[in-house]
Amino acid sequence: MILVDTGPLVAAANRRDTHHATSVAALTAARPPRLVPGLVIAEVSYLLARDATAAVEAGFLRSFATGFLTLAGLTVDDLDRSAELVEQYADLPLGATDACLVALAERLGIVEVATLDRRHFAVVRPRHVEAFTLVP
């Protein structure tokens, strides 16, 4: 099980992205489920609509129906924990989407995160492990 951040999804969907090949390889190699919270979906859709085409954005959205990606629901407790993380890491700043990924990982006991955002995820210390395993 792996949590997937915005960067690898955008790169995998957009062939023109410099991280396309490594992101496709990492996502393909990841053992399902590849969990994606709604905030990440919103970010990916926005970036693909801006930088790619409607067809690319639609393809990303359809990847949930095919089972390649799995929608991960957030709870009120996840959002409360996210608020704590946003405050704790205000100097980064961490931001809501990354904080929600951390909170979700803590609740589900997930160690592995697919992200291109080493700056944030290498610094954050989740409650359930000393550090995340980051891919690619």
Image (tube, helix red, strand yellow):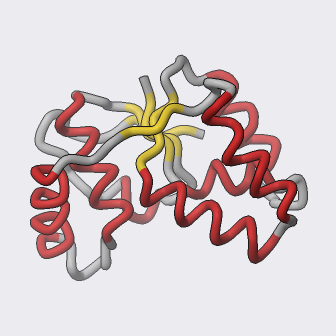
Query: Measured from the top left, where is residue 94 in percent x and y?
Result: 31, 71
Is residue 79 left or right of 56 when viewed as pictured? left
Q: Residue furthest top?
A: 31
Tell me which residue sits at (46%, 38%) in the image.
Answer: 71
Query: Measured from the top left, where is residue 100 in percent x and y?
Result: 29, 56
Is residue 24 left or right of 83 when viewed as pictured? right
Tell me which residue sits at (68%, 36%) in the image.
Answer: 63
Is residue 4 left or right of 73 when viewed as pictured? right
Query: Measured from the top left, where is residue 108 in percent x and y?
Result: 23, 30
Query: Measured from the top left, where is residue 27 in percent x and y?
Result: 64, 32
Quadrant housing the C terminus: top right
Tell me which residue sits at (83%, 63%) in the image.
Answer: 54
- 4 vs 38, nearest the viewer: 38
Tell me which residue sits at (75%, 76%) in the image.
Answer: 50
Is residue 136 left or right of 10 when viewed as pictured? left
Q: Is residue 72 above or below residue 61?
A: above
The number of callouts visible is 0
Quadrant housing the N terminus: top left
- 47 vs 31, nearest the viewer: 47
